Image (tube, grey):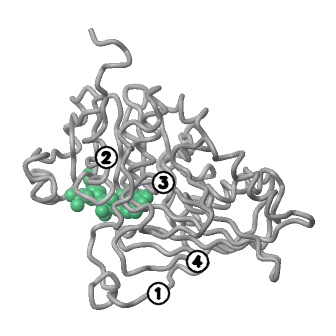
Amino acid sequence: MDEPGERRLKVAVVGASGYTGSELVRILLGHPQAEFALLTAGSNAGRCFSELHPQFRGVVDTVLADNTALADAELDYIFLALPHRVSMDFVAGHDLERTPVIDLSGDFRLADAATYEDWYEHAHSCPALLDSAAYGMSELNRERIRDARLVANPGCYPTSAILPLTPLLSAGLIETVGIIIDSKSGVSGAGNKPKPNLHFPQLHGNFSAYGLATHRHTPEIEQALGRAAGGDVALQFTPHLLPVSRGILSTIYARPKHGVDQQAIDDALAEAYSTEQFIRLRKAPPSLADVRGSNFCDIHAKLDGRSGNLIIVSAIDNLVKGAAGQAVQNMNIMAGLPEGSGLGQVALSP
Ligand SMILES: NC(=O)c1ccc[n+]([C@@H]2O[C@H](COP(=O)([O-])OP(=O)(O)OC[C@H]3O[C@@H](n4cnc5c(N)ncnc54)[C@H](OP(=O)(O)O)[C@@H]3O)[C@@H](O)[C@H]2O)c1
């Protein structure tokens, strides 16, 4: 029998035909203690994984199963890389005691079913599970993630905002009103289904805002920051579509409380993150290229003496720290493995 630390974990990626699903496969291929037991798809079930994602040709030529194959599979972890709503219906019919689930969709991120219904515009199919789902912001919620059977992996935009703002709100250094989160995302954030605004002529050389005051990541960010602040947080979140394939850059504005200086900001961020493997505190604003393909969140914070505002710039890869990388980080926490297992990739730049 294998030693506990040596046994390879058998994992399934449900929705492996999509962007985050294939990114999970890419990351898990380099994981020293995990192997794929099953890759599934929806309409693409029966097709070869590497036919859909030719970069895997000769490496992962597995045929994609449909989800019924999960019933017979002996698995340690299931990753759900499915659209919201499809995810919760899957979980509703699944025995979490048998196999824990890490869900990349938004279905289990909000603790309150009524808030979910308001923002997602349909009822939740298993509201009783919302309480037991651990919010999977790895650096901020390890204790709950470790013992969870259901992990709600955070949204990509929320990851870029919650990581820098949480230590500052927890320490009471910034006001809880008037926070502005101005985020720009690469197109892979929208998934792999074609849409008119994602066509090359619409996108190339273009840049646009969308989802003003209505984006579903708003309540997720408010929930996490409210927990950090110990009360309500009022914020403005505006997403933008960048004509690049990957990456999120968020520029965040907040009002420091009276008497708070740059040193206090730097100290709070350093106290929270100086020993964290995947968070890099930067002396200059990071760019998308610095993090592309990696699990890093890079953060720079600058107090502007003229305006009195704190300006924070954070950068992540939406498909890695914003999705598949953080999901693997969470599996590592749950399995008691070194948190960085399989996540050693540095950025692809230049
Ligand atoms: N893209 C990002 O940057 C990002 C970041 C964080 C979180 N997320 C979340 O992660 C989830 C996946 O996102 P994505 O960008 O990977 O989407 P995507 O590229 O559109 O992929 C979704 C996948 O789900 C599969 N699917 C749909 N219904 C299915 C079913 N009934 N059974 C099995 N598979 C089914 C589809 O398979 P077929 O194509 O074979 O039908 C598709 O491959 C979403 O909830 C998204 O909000 C995405």
Q: What residue is rendered at 92% in x and 64% in y?
A: 259
- Mark 2 or mark 3, earlier in chain: 2
Q: Secondary structure at mark 2?
A: helix
Above/below status of 170 relative to 5 = below
Count of picture labels: 4
In the current view of this chain or complex, which residue is farthest to the top? 1
The amino acid pointed to by label 4 is Thr
Is 12 positioned to the left or the right of 241 in the image? left
Mark 3 = which residue? Answer: 296
Q: Quadrant of the C terminus?
A: bottom left
Q: Nearer the viewer, mark 2 or mark 4?
A: 2
Residue 27 coordinates in the image, percent (x, y): 31, 46
Mark 1 = which residue? Answer: 208
Q: Quadrant of residue 342?
A: top left
Q: Nearer the viewer, mark 3 or mark 4?
A: 3
Mark 2 = which residue? Answer: 27
